[in-house]
């Protein structure tokens, strides 16, 4: 079973900025008349949270109530940046220019120039932006030159000032500290092309092609080489380049452009390549035609490839019977060729999903297993056959097929899941004795502690259903000790205590002092890793001998959070075997506000101490208050008060959703701390009539995202009768899907988790259960 204590967080795509440095320690109680410096800190925290109105208020009061120039310039910087992110662009221009002109000696002047450049960018004033960015570089040279020169080059491109753009991109290339510079080289080559300097463009594209391993970049470079050769009067060399793209990079759009160029020039192109490229650009009818011509010409050469993608093309066209016919050609005539196993899978899937023929789909999978019982796909396909039977509510057949998979392929990676699913299905049938047998069989092939705990929990459930509470208790005790901190162990503990899911602590305290805890952790570090006591682990300065720390900090101060995170993450991974540096980095990242990376670095230290998941909770509390922190506490507590969710529940959801990184975008397009899809965010904002003038970018504001996410989760909770399992399933997997899963569960929350059709949603609920249990144990008052 997957776990959450050592999270593998997906790579996210950034969109807009968040902000610097709150502390996870409790926010001090405001004094009646804050000093201007305190107002700046308060404004910075509001800015970090995305509360523009409060930030503007605090910065304005700081500006009004101080005579200190540094405080005034800090206030103007805060006001200007807030106006910028609040899309009050003229106000941002006026404020930043005032700060720059009025306080020429200010330490904030460089940051003001950068924010001014961003404002000009937003106003589509490229030359003014160039001037502002250059002024930043004059004040802060040698820190993040590569990024600034790239922005300068981008702005010159907007004005078609190609030579100036080339100069800027070359400066960025020379200043770049990492190897991923191909986008800069492409800009340079494109600019030479725009200047009609074909020879230099040709050499530059060839350098790009030779230097990258990325097929899409290779395709773009080679296609441009072909274009240039044609313009230079070398058509044969141009066509050769196009052919290379067509034959080697069919997934790239440049392959389609090369294909069109070859066809327009009357050049002969392989019908197989033509079919593949048309398929990948969505020209499905043309793909079918090309594959058909190819099969008529050379029926034995790569025929399985042609049939395979012809099937997909027909499927995209909605002609599912013809798709199955294409794949059946592979099954019948191309035995043991590349796509032969996959053809069975595609046929079965099409029969079940598109033709509503579950029995035929099951037979297709079983045919493969019978014909190739030693093939690595055989246990997987037998599992799938059982899954289709279960989806078709033919539960006895499903149970038999899963039991067969577990016994026939007892050494495969599918054995445990097969026997476990057989047990769940027997439970659903009310055949509790048989269910116990299947779960006990699964124990014989259970390698992971989480699987052992799962089997014992369900053995206990079966005994409970049979009216044998003593045997149920014994099984749950076994489950509770098999995988401490794992879902099934923690759920078993709650069953033993007769506690409902997500039971809140009777009392809790959300207050702790991370500085005091850090001192205790430092003493532990010296002892655990034999670090000399004279080495001050509370001193961050040794970290800054690495230029990534310097660049990352400067980028963070500029508000370029995703770029900064990449610098810090590169450094974190390189020091993963150094406990002292990892400890220092943990504290620095928490202070900075980069919580995701801080969490991962804290776990890195505990890994070096040889601690497993359960063992990490014997480490000093400092580490776990970071790993399971109360970040954005005031916002979370406020949202909990509005919705009647327990704050620890919302912290658990937020940690699972984003690991407290507010500027993230998932691969599915979900944004911010609570990972809200833009269309959902728009709907919630409309229903709440808040915030004013809502835009999708508001989802990156913690102040907005947390409140919208909590409100949306509460709507799911109300829609599903107060059932937190079902509300979480709806939040992650959709309300419509949840409505389909509920009738399968017989009002049993444990069974509901098992019958959820999406593995992501099943794991989502399990992970949040684990997290809530951890938060409850950390913050409850005994």
Image (cartoon, helix red, strand yellow):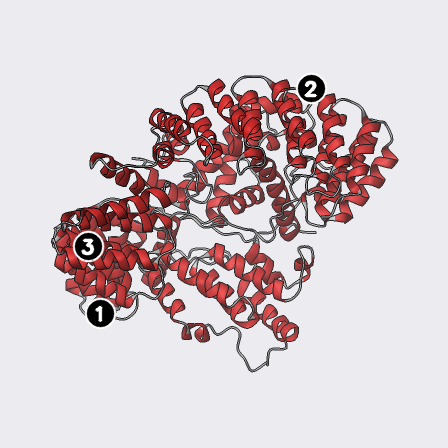
Q: Secondary structure at mark 1?
A: helix
Label disc, if present, on residue 139 of the rendered structure:
1
Reply above or below: 261 against 81. Answer: above
Number of the front mark, 3 or 2: 2
Q: Which residue is mark 2?
A: 394
Q: Earlier in the sequence, mark 3 or mark 1?
A: 3
**How far is disc 2 from disc 1 in space, using C-alphas?**
72 Å
Q: Are marks 3 and 1 in contact (CB under 8 Å)?
A: no
Say left or right for 159 vs 262: left
**How far is disc 3 from disc 2 in space, using C-alphas?**
69 Å
Binning the other alpha carbons within 10 Å of mark 3 as few (below 14), some (14 to 19) or many (20 upward) gives many
**Furthest residue in direction bottom, as rendered:** 534
Residue 780 horizontal/vertical position (percent): 65, 50
Say left or right for 283 vs 768: left
Reply above or below: 168 against 221. Answer: below
Q: Which residue is mark 3?
A: 95
Could you tell me which residue is drawn at 65 percent across and 72 percent down?
528
**How far is disc 3 from disc 1 in space, using C-alphas?**
19 Å
In front of the other: 455 or 627: 455
Could you tell me which residue is drawn at 62 percent across and 63 percent down?
606
Indicate the quadrant where residue 183 lies. bottom left
Say left or right for 619 vs 216: right
Indicate the quadrant where residue 651 lies. top right
Residue 260 horizontal/vertical position (percent): 25, 36
Q: Is any atom of residue 266 visible in this view?
A: yes
Residue 309 horizontal/vertical position (percent): 44, 31
């Amino acid at each position: 079973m997957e776990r959450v204590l050592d999270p593998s967080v997906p790579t996210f795509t950034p969109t807009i900025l968040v902000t610097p440095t709150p502390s996870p320690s409790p926010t001090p109680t405001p004094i009646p008349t804050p000093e201007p410096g305190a107002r700046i800190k308060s404004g910075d925290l509001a800015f970090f949270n995305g509360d523009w109105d409060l930030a503007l208020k605090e910065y304005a009061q700081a500006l009004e109530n101080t005579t200190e120039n540094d405080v005034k310039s800090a206030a103007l910087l805060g006001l200007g940046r807030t106006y910028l992110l609040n899309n009050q662009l003229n106000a941002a221009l006026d404020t930043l220019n005032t700060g720059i002109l009025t306080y020429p000696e200010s330490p904030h002047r460089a940051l003001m120039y950068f924010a001014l450049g961003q404002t000009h960018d937003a106003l589509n004033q490229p030359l003014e932006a160039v001037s502002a960015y250059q002024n930043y570089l004059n004040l802060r040279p040698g820190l993040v030159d590569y990024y600034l020169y790239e922005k300068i080059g981008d702005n010159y491109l907007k004005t078609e000032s190609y030579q100036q753009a080339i100069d800027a991109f070359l400066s960025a290339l020379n200043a770049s500290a990492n190897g991923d510079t191909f986008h800069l080289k492409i800009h340079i080559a494109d600019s030479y092309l725009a200047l009609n300097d074909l020879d230099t463009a040709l050499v530059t594209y060839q350098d790009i092609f030779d230097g990258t391993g990325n097929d899409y970049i290779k395709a773009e470079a080679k296609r441009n080489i072909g274009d240039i050769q044609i313009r230079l009067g070398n058509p044969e060399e141009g066509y050769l380049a196009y052919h290379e793209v067509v034959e080697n990079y069919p997934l790239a759009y440049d392959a389609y452009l090369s294909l069109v160029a070859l066809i327009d020039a009357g050049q002969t192109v392989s019908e197989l390549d033509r079919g593949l490229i048309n398929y990948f650009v969505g020209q499905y009818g043309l793909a079918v035609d090309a594959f058909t011509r190819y099969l008529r010409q050379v029926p034995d050469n790569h025929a399985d490839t042609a049939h395979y993608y012809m099937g997909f093309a027909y499927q995209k066209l909605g002609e599912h019977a013809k798709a199955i016919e294409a794949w059946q050609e592979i099954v019948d005539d191309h035995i043991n060729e590349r796509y032969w196993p996959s053809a069975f899978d595609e046929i079965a899937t099409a029969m079940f999903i598109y033709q509503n023929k579950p029995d035929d789909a099951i037979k297709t999978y079983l045919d493969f297993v019978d014909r190739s019982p030693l093939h690595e796909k055989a246990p997987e396909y037998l599992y799938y056959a059982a899954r289709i039977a279960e989806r078709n509510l033919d539960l006895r057949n499903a149970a038999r097929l899963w039991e067969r998979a577990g016994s026939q392929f007892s050494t495969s990676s599918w054995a445990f899941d097969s026997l476990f699913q057989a047990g769940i299905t027997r439970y659903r049938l009310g055949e509790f004795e048989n269910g116990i047998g299947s779960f006990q069989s699964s124990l014989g092939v259970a390698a992971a502690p989480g699987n052992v705990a799962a089997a014992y929990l369900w053995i206990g459930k079966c005994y409970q259903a049979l009216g044998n509470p003593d045997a149920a208790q014994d099984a749950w005790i076994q489950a509770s000790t098999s995988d401490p901190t794992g879902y099934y162990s923690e759920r078993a503990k709650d069953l033993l205590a007769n506690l409902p899911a997500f039971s809140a602590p009777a009392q809790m305290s959300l207050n702790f002092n991370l500085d005091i805890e850090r001192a205790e952790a430092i003493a532990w570090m010296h002892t655990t890793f034999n670090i000399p006591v004279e080495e001050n682990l509370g001193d961050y300065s040794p970290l800054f001998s690495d230029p990534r720390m310097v660049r990352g900090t400067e980028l963070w101060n500029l508000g370029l959070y995703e770029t900064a995170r990449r610098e810090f993450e590169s450094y974190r991974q390189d020091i993963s075997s150094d406990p002292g540096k990892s400890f220092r980095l943990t504290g620095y990242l928490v202070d900075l506000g980069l919580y995701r990376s801080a969490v991962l670095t804290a776990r890195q230290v505990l890994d070096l101490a040889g601690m497993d998941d359960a063992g990490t909770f014997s480490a000093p509390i400092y580490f776990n208050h970071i790993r399971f922190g109360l970040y954005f506490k005031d916002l979370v507590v406020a949202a909990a008060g509005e919705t009647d969710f327990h704050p620890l529940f919302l912290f658990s959801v937020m940690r699972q959703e984003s690991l407290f990184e507010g500027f993230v975008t998932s691969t599915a397009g979900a944004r911010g701390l609570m990972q809200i899809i833009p269309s959902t965010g728009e709907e919630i904002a409309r229903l709440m009539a808040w915030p004013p003038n809502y835009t999708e970018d508001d989802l990156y504001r913690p102040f907005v995202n947390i409140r919208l996410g909590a409100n949306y989760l509460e709507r799911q909770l109300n829609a599903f009768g107060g059932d937190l399992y079902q509300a979480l399933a709806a939040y992650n997997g959709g309300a419509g899907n949840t409505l389909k899963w509920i009738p399968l569960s017989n009002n049993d929350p444990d069974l509901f988790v098992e019958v959820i059709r999406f593995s992501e949603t099943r794991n989502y609920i399990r992970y949040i259960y684990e997290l809530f249990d951890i938060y409850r144990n950390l913050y409850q008052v005994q």
